[in-house]
Amino acid sequence: MAGKARVHELAKELGVTSKEVLARLSEQGEFVKSASSTVEAPVARRLRESFGGVKAPEKPPQKAAAKKS
């Protein structure tokens, strides 16, 4: 994600609560007020790394389309 990212968007992406993200950012020395605050791209990258990367959402396997005769 280029540019700025909102805290609540990062939380959703990482599968955690906004409060957890705010706490982790505070531990890293970043000043953010709320879940609607934005953080710069390098800060977002460090945050993702601290949570162990991005959790990919599980997609259900797609069923093959039935052929009509």
Image (cartoon, rainbow, N blue to C red):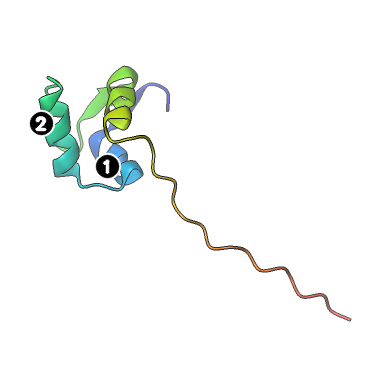
Give the quarter of the figure containing the N terminus: top left
| Pointer 2 with pointer 1, Cβ within 8 A | no
Quadrant location of residue 21?
top left
In the visual, does 57 lie left or right of 7?
right
Q: Which mark is residue 33?
A: 2
Quadrant location of residue 4?
top left
First-in-chain label (2 vs 1): 1
Residue at the spot 32% in from the left edge and 35% down from the top edge:
52
Q: Identify the amino acid type marked 1.
A: Ala
Residue at the spot 89% in from the left edge and 81% down from the top edge:
69
Q: Position of residue 27 (x, y in %)?
A: 11, 26
Who is closer to the viewer here, 33 or 29?
Answer: 29
In the visual, does 29 lie left or right of 46?
left
Q: Identify the amino acid type marked 2.
A: Lys
Residue at the spot 27% in from the left edge and 42% down from the top edge:
11
Q: Position of residue 65 (x, y in %)?
A: 74, 70
Q: Dot 2: few (<14), some (14–19), or many (≥20) neighbours within 10 Å?
A: few
Quadrant location of residue 9?
top left
Q: Which mark is residue 11?
A: 1
Residue 17 lies, with reference to residue 5, above or below; the image says: below
Q: Dot 1: few (<14), some (14–19), or many (≥20) neighbours within 10 Å?
A: some
